[in-house]
Image (cartoon, grey):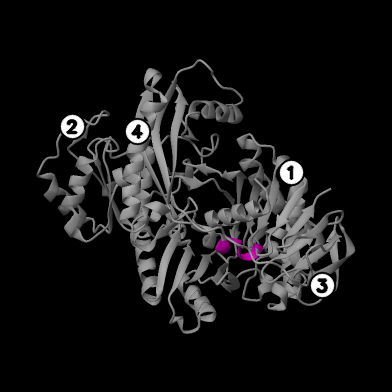
Amino acid sequence: MIEVAVDTGGTFTDFVLRKDNDLQTFKLPSTPKDPSQAIIEGLGCLLPGLDQPFKLFHGTTVATNAFLERKGARVVMITTSGFEDVIFIGRQARPKLYDFLVTRPSPVVARKRVIGVSERISADGSVLRGLSPHEKSRLKAFLARERAEAVAVCLLHSYVNPSHEREIGQWLEDLGIPVCLSSEVIPEFREYERFSTTLINAYLVPVVHRYLHRLAKRLPRSSIFVIQSNGGMLPLRVAGSQAVRTILSGPAAGVMGAWTLSQKLGLSRIITFDMGGTSTDVSLVDGLPSYTRDYQIEGFPVALPVIDIHTVGAGGGSIARVDRGGALRVGPQSAGADPGPVCYARGGEKITVTDANLLVGRLPSEHFLSGRMKLDYQAALKAMEPLSRALGLSPFETAQGVIRVVNINMARALRAVSLERGYDPRDFVLFCYGGAGALHAAELARELGIRKVIVPAMAGVLSALGMLASRPMFDYSRTVFLSKERLLYPEVAALVEDLARSALAEAQALGFISDDLILEPSVDLRYQGQSYEITVPFDEAFISCFEKTHERLYGYFLADHPLELTAVRCRVYVRGQEFSFPGWSPEGPALLGQVRIFIDNRWEAGKILSWRGLAPGDSGRGPVVIISDYTTCYVPPEVGFLVDDLGNLWLEIT
């Protein structure tokens, strides 16, 4: 079976095709108005005629963009009477504590489209007030009046007793619109987080479902899987109804690709650094990828397990400007794929990070993307002049300043996932990928005291490669409160086994064979009196594991303080074959020419090397610019590089 991975990014759409362990790569500018257009065009180049069966693994930004641009469905929310304002009150946490003029992002549901129903379930699951029969006609009339395109049903304490939510779901089955029940999306306590996650899912389901249905219709010979935010795959028929799980689709695949390759290289501790055209995503891997359930998008919680990725608006297309105080700023606004940086000669007029790298010599105009695309140096130089005049600097000093500012922004993100989480970045290897990351990785590593940087041979398409290495994965959870003498291994094990049976049954219902399924149980623990939990793997040493994790995160643990368990969890994933990376052999000459690079306010001579021309074992020192098909690596002075057997670049920072 032919397998094709497609990662739709803000600037480029990446393709990796695998057939008989051979890999082909391809890259096209994204088509933001219709992402499927670039996909069909790219697949047409890789699979002429599209007349053969193939598996398509897709990382998509459709859900993210629909949320950020507020282009989701016209959604109605149904909740318990008296709790209509929960979603608007939130946690009353200010995004900026001392800013009186801060504005909160607009919610995805208008207050007038929230309706309360007369029912009540207590925290122990007992029914205090049943659903009144007249609510059925009242709800249907309300949905018709509001022209609802999707419904989120979020009732109080439905995580422990979902009967009322299910009854409302049955009432609305004949309306022909998506109905999302919070007891199915996220059956966990904390009303605000549960309401928010379910509401966002309902808001996005019609958009994502239409997009995937349209894509499947245009690719009738394909079996489509969508990468979800936990790094696993979802079959098409599941992904359409669980759109909220795809919000970090592409970035999560990148972390999975980096983790898979790092295992092959014998590395267990890496910090992933993915700099694309629009944003930079960073994550920490300490043996396994890091996960969180505290993810927020524009301040709205999505309380599902996602790979812990920190994103900043810093990419090759990030726009440079001077603010009202006269300071140089870079991002988060981006030139995107259309029109793109000025040097792309597609109508862009605002200076970007890519333009700055071109002007200082890190991006040779004749050799960009191995010569397939020529950059317009003069256009970038002319566009830089207004910015440099405003700062009183030369165009090259200004370009150098743009690079330094964006590096500061990205270094702050790297510290957020390491130092701020109790990790010393000096104990990790910086794992760099994305089209623009290798231009900045060495300087960022030096800033954080990291000694080694790896730039994969397929750095420009590593997120797509990670999709080929991913497996179907499903997360299940159940809220359970246990404390004191009941927090014993046998009692907790019984709860975990019960959830595992349900999880296996649901996975098998999707067509997966039980012998291929692997379970990973975990539990949420906290000290009594604490407000938030730590998720740890479940085995006989689960309490000891909690104490060690608590000490790493907070610097202490309380040996004699009673614990409380709040949830049991089970991850089910499908057993897969070990992913094999292709070997490396040189093609053509290594030396392409000489280049002048602007470093510390002076010009220095450097070399331009072809990555494809380098053989395993080749090494050297900067200043060097190394060109590949989809990424360019800048090796600063006093930094050494080495090519390994797979063609990856290892940078040694001194």
Query: Which numbered mark, 2 or 4, is in the foreground of this view?
Result: 4
Name the N-terminal-most of marks 1 and 3: 1
Q: Is residue 417 magenta?
A: no
Disc 1 to disc 3, C-alpha distance: 31 Å
Name the N-terminal-most of marks 1 and 4: 1
For this rendering, which residue is in front, 150 or 557?
557
Mark 3 residue type: Ala
Disc 3 to disc 2, C-alpha distance: 74 Å
Left or right: where 76 falls relative to 91: left
Name the N-terminal-most of marks 2 and 4: 2
Query: Local crowd at mark 1 within 10 Å, few (<14), some, or many (≥20)?
Result: some
Residue that numbered label 4 is attached to: 495
Residue that numbered label 1 is attached to: 448
* Secondary structure of the residue carrying numbered label 3: loop
Disc 2 to disc 4, C-alpha distance: 23 Å
Residue that numbered label 3 is attached to: 590
Can residue 189 be seen in the rendering of this structure? Answer: no
Left or right: where 471 falls relative to 150: right
Query: Local crowd at mark 3 within 10 Å, few (<14), some, or many (≥20)?
Result: some
Please give the range of residues in magenta.
Answer: 459-465
Name the N-terminal-most of marks 2 and 1: 2
Mark 4 residue type: Leu
For residue 127, the mark is: 2
